[in-house]
Image (cartoon, helix red, strand yellow):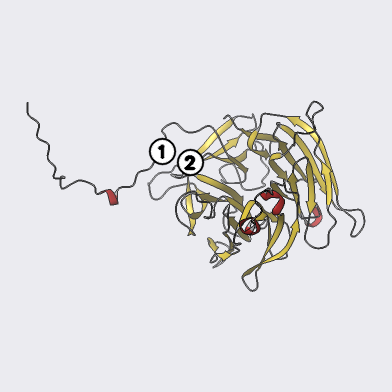
């Protein structure tokens, strides 16, 4: 048998420049990096409605998949929607959005596509002519090149508590703020403004979080380190962390002029790694908690006293070893708001931040050991059933 090999490509061949390959595994990943509760479907009743069989809803995100779960009154976990992202999920945020619409929560997704995606669950998929629910793209904003790059936003994401604005930030330099609104009445869909830049050259971002300002302009807090002095320094004997200073920076979005400005900059502990928002208004003093090695520090806008409390440690844990907070979840809708945080050892802590008894008095921070569970990449409180979901590091 003779086989002839032709060097001339067939007429139906696909040119390399028109070919796009997608890596997608057949077996779904059981390791979740993000877990967020919310109200994503009215299948079991509208938001905050009393029901004889309540169900808690939450989403989980792996590196390339978004899953909607519900838990019934018997504690059974039900997968409602499982949908591929066809990309790498870098950050996720859930928010209710401006008043109006169907009162379902939105999902903001930051991926390696260089785009900000706003999703919402649709009970039917018109493009596929099926009644199966799926996540539909409400808005898609492009702000950078594809790929998990350190200067392309998407690594960090934070949403104003009232759903008025959203900040998306990169590891280095770039960050954008989008103002969210509804145009054309309450039944209109969500709209995003043009991106407002809040860039900082030669600056590394460690975390961002919203600040509860009630009815005032939206404010976001960021942990930053400016390394311009390290680049210009000729003394290589001094460690870089001794030259630089880690700062807590507050960015304010002026809704009147549609401009972003740095409102305040405050020095923090060099080991600070996470920002936790604190409830404001009648539920708390507002501001943020800064998680650093062995310490929790309360900071807020204006001339507010700094308050520090140590993180409880195990008796057999060496004092020379630092203890850091790796995950947290908040419960601000209850009568007594609290924060549940987890350390790198798996220990859970119950934290409450309360206003001072008198005007201009410092806040009171109480922290106590709650329980020990396996270490989680993310944790979430399912308030309707009083359950805690822990997305463990090992699935």
Labelled pair 2, 1 in contact (Cβ < 8 Å): yes
Residue in the picture at 83% in, 47% down: 308
Residue in the picture at 24% in, 49% down: 15
Position of 192 compared to 226: left or right? Answer: left
Which residue is at the front of the view, 291 or 203?
203
Q: Residue furthest left?
A: 1
Q: Is residue 241 above or below residue 375?
A: below
Q: Residue furthest right?
A: 358
Which of the labelled discs sits on residue 24, or is there none?
1
Which residue is at the front of the view, 381 or 88?
88
Q: Is residue 96 above or below residue 10?
A: below
Count of numbered marks: 2
| Image quadrant in which the C terminus is located | top right
- Residue 118, can we see it? yes
| Image quadrant in which the N terminus is located | top left
For the residue labelled by badge 1, is the local secondary structure a helix, a strand or a loop? loop
For the residue labelled by badge 2, is the local secondary structure a helix, a strand or a loop? loop
Label 2 neighbourhood size at 10 Å, few (<14), some (14-19), many (20+)?
many
Corner quadrant of residue 327:
top right
Q: Which residue is mark 2?
A: 64
Which residue is at the front of the view, 393 or 233?
233
Q: Is residue 228 above or below residue 375?
A: below
Residue in the picture at 69% in, 47% down: 274
- Residue 383, can we see it? no
Question: Where does residue 202 sit, x and y in percent of width and height?
Answer: 60, 59
Question: Where does residue 92 sit, x and y in percent of width and height?
Answer: 57, 47
Question: Where does residue 343 sit, x and y in percent of width and height?
Answer: 72, 36
Question: Where does residue 237 sit, x and y in percent of width and height?
Answer: 67, 48
Q: Residue furthest bottom?
A: 257
Position of 268 compared to 197: left or right? Answer: right
Disc nearer the start of the sequence (2/1) = 1
């Amino acid at each position: 048998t003779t086989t002839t090999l032709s060097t001339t490509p067939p007429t139906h061949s696909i040119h390399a420049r028109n070919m796009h390959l997608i890596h997608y595994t057949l077996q779904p990943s059981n390791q979740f990096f993000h877990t967020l509760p919310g109200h994503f479907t009215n299948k079991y009743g509208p938001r905050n409605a009393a029901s004889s069989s309540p169900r808690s809803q939450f989403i989980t995100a792996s590196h390339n998949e978004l899953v909607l779960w519900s838990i019934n009154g018997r504690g059974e976990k039900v997968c409602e929607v499982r949908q591929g992202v066809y990309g790498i999920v870098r950050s996720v945020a859930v928010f209710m959005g401006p008043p109006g619409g169907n009162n379902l929560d939105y999902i903001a997704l930051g991926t390696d596509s260089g785009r900000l995606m706003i999703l919402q669950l649709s009970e039917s998929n018109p493009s596929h002519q099926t009644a199966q629910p799926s996540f539909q793209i409400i808005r898609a904003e492009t702000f950078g090149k594809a790929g998990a790059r350190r200067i392309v936003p998407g690594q960090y994401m934070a949403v104003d508590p009232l759903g008025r604005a959203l900040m998306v930030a990169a590891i280095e330099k770039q960050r954008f703020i989008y103002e969210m609104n509804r145009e054309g009445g309450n039944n209109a869909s969500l709209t995003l403004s043009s991106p407002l830049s809040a860039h900082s050259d030669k600056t590394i971002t460690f975390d961002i979080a919203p600040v509860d300002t009630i009815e005032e302009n939206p404010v976001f807090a960021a942990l930053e380190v400016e390394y311009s002095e390290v680049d210009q320094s000729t003394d290589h004997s001094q460690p870089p962390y001794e030259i630089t200073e880690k700062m807590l920076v507050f960015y304010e979005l002026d809704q009147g002029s549609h401009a972003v400005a740095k409102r305040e900059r405050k020095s923090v502990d060099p080991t600070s790694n996470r920002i936790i928002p604190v409830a404001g208004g009648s539920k708390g003093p507002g501001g943020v908690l800064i998680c650093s090695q062995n310490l929790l520090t309360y900071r807020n806008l204006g001339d507010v006293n700094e308050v520090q409390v140590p993180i409880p440690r195990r008796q057999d844990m060496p004092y020379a070893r630092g203890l850091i907070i790796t995950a947290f979840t908040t419960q601000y809708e209850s009568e007594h708001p609290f924060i549940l945080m987890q350390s790198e050892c798996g220990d859970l802590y119950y934290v409450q931040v309360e206003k001072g008894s008198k005007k201009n008095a410092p806040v009171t921070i109480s922290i106590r050991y709650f329980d020990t569970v396996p270490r989680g990449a993310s944790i979430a409180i399912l308030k309707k059933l009083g359950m805690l979901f822990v997305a463990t590091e090992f699935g």
